[in-house]
Image (cartoon, rainbow, N blue to C red):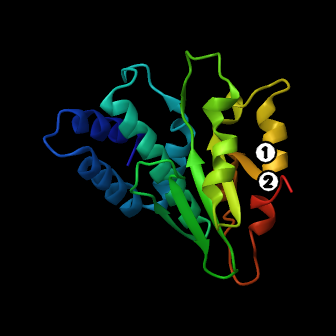
Amino acid sequence: MTFAELLDMIKKGDGSPDSFVLVCQKLEDRIFRMKAAALPALLVDIGSIPESINHDSTPEKLFAKAADIILARSLRELGLQATVNKERADCADVIAKSQFHEYSLVGDAKAFRLSRTAKNQKDFKVKSMADWRGDHNYAVLVCPYFQYPKKTSQIYGQAIDEDICLLSWEHLLFLLHARVRESATVNLASMWSISE
């Protein structure tokens, strides 16, 4: 699947008679079934919402859900058992569990419009991630590297205080290119607890 094909599925989902949940399930099925070699191309672009997608529209919500699905798929490629949360309540969007080590994590994917320059700490939901962690060991937030604040920001202090791992899509891309994969001898827990 290419990024253009993903956008096409998202745009078709807007006019679909299927429910939002069903369209999300179709996206998840397609992304989870695609070849691993196609994933890096999606990681390059998923962090930026195209301007062709209207603000506060169904396609924008589908794009955000696709980002969560791509995060879960990336975690699977890193050797974790990852699922996308079907609930739309106040909770993390991705849940992953180590197959080899005794830990689990929650994850949240972020995508922003390139035209949106003013972002504040609420956009990143670092404090929410701490609440959503619940009984899980770690919490991971993923957004484009260049979208993280370049100067001082409350999110960095919050991430350290709450032990939230701030990753980027570019970090995940690097890990996939390097073929990093958790195993009985490779434990990625130290990466998820980097703020600690």
**In the image shown, does 90 or 84 lie closer to the viewer?**
90
Q: What is the x, y in percent for residue 161?
A: 84, 48
The crowding category of the residue bearing disc 1, from other C-alpha atoms within 10 Å (few below 14, some 14 to 19, many at least 20), is many
Q: What is the x, y in percent for residue 51?
A: 43, 19
- Marks 2 and 1, how far apart in space? 5 Å
Residue 127 is marked as none
The crowding category of the residue bearing disc 2, from other C-alpha atoms within 10 Å (few below 14, some 14 to 19, many at least 20), is many
| 101 lies left or right of 17 | right
Q: Which residue is mark 1?
A: 159
| 153 lies left or right of 39 | right
Q: Is residue 176 above or below residue 41?
A: below
Residue 75 location, quadrant: bottom right
Q: Is residue 152 above or below residue 124?
A: above
Q: Secondary structure at mark 2?
A: loop
Amino acid type at mark 2: Asp
Which quarter of the rendering shows the C terminus? bottom right
Residue at horizontal 39%, vertical 55%? 31
Amino acid type at mark 1: Ala
| 141 lies left or right of 66 | right
Q: Residue 53: in sight, yes or no?
A: yes
Residue at horizontal 74%, vertical 68%? 188
Residue at horizontal 69%, vertical 43%? 127
Q: What is the x, y in percent for residue 15?
A: 18, 33
**In the image shown, does 121 or 167 lie closer to the viewer?**
121
Q: Are marks 2 and 1 in contact (CB under 8 Å)?
A: yes
Residue at horizontal 39%, vertical 31%? 60
Q: Residue 168: in sight, yes or no?
A: no
Residue 125 location, quadrant: top right
Residue 163 is marked as 2
Q: What is the x, y in percent for residue 56?
A: 38, 24
Q: Secondary structure at mark 1?
A: helix
Q: Is residue 109 above or below residue 145?
A: below
